[in-house]
Structures are given as structure tokens and as C-alpha cells.
Image (cartoon, rainbow, N blue to C red):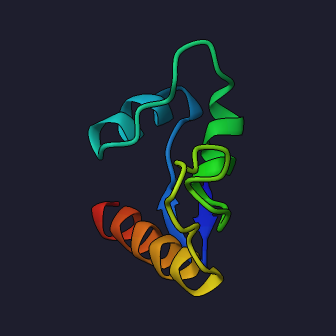
Amino acid sequence: MLIAQGKIIYFNDASKSCDYFESIGYKCPEMSNPADYFMTLMSAENPNEGEIEVGKVPMSEDEILKEYTKKISYMSDKY
């Protein structure tokens, strides 16, 4: 079972998790550990960390939380 912000976003066999998340738009990168990928999905870290372009303003903490909440709501609604 995967829970984020108190919402169930996945509850099924672990062997089916990669296929499920891919079906809702979150494909686990090849050669990566699915558990690590899912933990990243469920974290409220800056989604652009390490990928900030020159001249682009980094996201504020409020923007990060807003995007995170939106992502978790989407996953919960899909489930």
C-alpha cells in the first residue's frame, strides 16, 4: 500500500505497481529501483532540483507544496 498526504494512491500486488503507475502517467525509469522511484513520487521535494535552467527562477516552497498536493490528488483520484 502506498499512502501520501493521508490518501491511498496504490493498494495492490507489488508486482503490478510499475504497470499501474505507468498507466496513469508515471513510468518507472529503466534500470532504477521501483521502490526508490515511488518514494520520490510521494515526496514533496522540488521536482526540478538538479535540473534548474540558467535564468530560470527555482520554485518556491509554496509552489512545490502546491504541485505536490496536485500530483497526490491526481494519483488518489485515479486510484
Tell me which residue sits at (48%, 61%) in the image. 9
What quarter of the picture does the C terminus occupy?
Answer: bottom left
In the picture provided, is 17 more to the left or to the right than 74? right
Q: Quadrant of residue 71?
A: bottom left
What quarter of the picture does the N terminus occupy?
Answer: bottom right
Q: Total of numbered circles in the picture? A: 0
Give the camera-side residue of 77 and 33.
33
Give the camera-side residue of 3 and 29.
29
In the rendered image, residue 2, in percent from the top left (x then y), is placed at 60, 56
Q: Quadrant of residue 4?
A: bottom right
- Whether residue 77 is situated above or below residue 12 in the rendered picture: below
Tell me which residue sits at (35%, 35%) in the image. 22
> Which residue extends farthest top?
31
Give the camera-side residue of 43 and 59.
59
In the rendered image, residue 58, in percent from the top left (x then y), is placed at 58, 67
Tell me which residue sits at (31%, 70%) in the image. 77
- Whether residue 35 is situated above or below residue 32 in the rendered picture: below
> Which residue extends farthest front?
55
- Whether residue 54 is situated above or below residue 75 in the rendered picture: above
In the rendered image, residue 25, in percent from the top left (x then y), is placed at 31, 43
In the rendered image, residue 21, in percent from the top left (x then y), is placed at 40, 41
